[in-house]
Image (cartoon, rainbow, N blue to C red):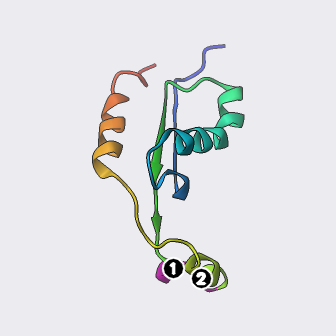
């Protein structure tokens, strides 16, 4: 059975700083998926925390988190571009 190639990405506060420890932790969240099948690429990126956009029941917990936009759009675009050709079946 031939499988389609796929890529995985994670966006979250774990990657607020792109350092080896953060990468290892963020990558560990994807371990169960990577056990099932090998992705052609894995992207690990910082995310966005905006308590004002959270649903009411979660708003208080979100306000306790560091607020901000930690997305590196240049890195995200570069990773997405790197997938060109890797996902062709």
- Position in image of residue 20 (x %, y %): 51, 38
Kindly identify which residue carries mark 2.
59
What residue lies at 27% left-to-right and 46% top-to-bottom? 74
Residue 65 shown left or right of residue 32 in the figure: left
Within 10 angstroms of label 2, few (less than 14), some, or many (20 or more) residues? some
Residue under label 1? 51
What is the number of the mark on residue 36? none
Q: Is residue 78 left or right of residue 11?
A: left
Name the residue: 34% across, 52% down: 72
Q: Dividing the image into 4 quarters, which one contains the N terminus?
A: top right
Label 1: how many residues lie within 10 Å, few (<14), some (14-19) or many (20+)? some
Q: Where does the image place residue 66, in percent across and percent down from the top left?
A: 50, 71
Whether residue 55 appears in magenta in the rendering, the answer is yes
Q: Is residue 40 located in the magenta-colored stretch of the structure?
A: no
Considering the numbered disc 1 on the image, is that residue within a helix, a strand or a loop? helix
Marks 2 and 1: CB-CB under 8 Å? yes
State how many labels appear: 2
Residue 44's x, y, as percent? Answer: 48, 43
Above or below: residue 10 compared with residue 59: above
The vertical placement of 54 against 20, above or below, is below
- Magenta-tinted stretch: 52-56
Q: Residue, x 55% and y 23% (percent of image)?
A: 4
The Cα–Cα distance between marks 2 and 1, rounded to whole angstroms, is: 6 Å
Q: Position of residue 30 (x, y in %)?
A: 63, 39
Which quarter of the figure has residue 3?
top right
The residue at 61%/14% (across/down) is 2
- Secondary structure of the magenta portion, mostly? helix
Dot 2 or dot 1: first in sequence order is 1
């Amino acid at each position: 059975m031939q499988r389609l190639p796929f890529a995985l990405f994670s966006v979250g506060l774990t990657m607020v700083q792109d350092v080896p420890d953060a990468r290892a932790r963020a990558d560990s969240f994807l371990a169960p998926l990577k056990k099932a099948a090998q992705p052609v690429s894995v992207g690990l990126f910082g995310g966005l925390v905006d308590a004002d956009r959270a649903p009411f029941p979660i708003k208080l917990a979100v306000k306790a988190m560091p607020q901000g936009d930690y997305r590196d759009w240049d890195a995200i675009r570069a990773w997405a571009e790197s997938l060109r050709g890797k996902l062709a079946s």
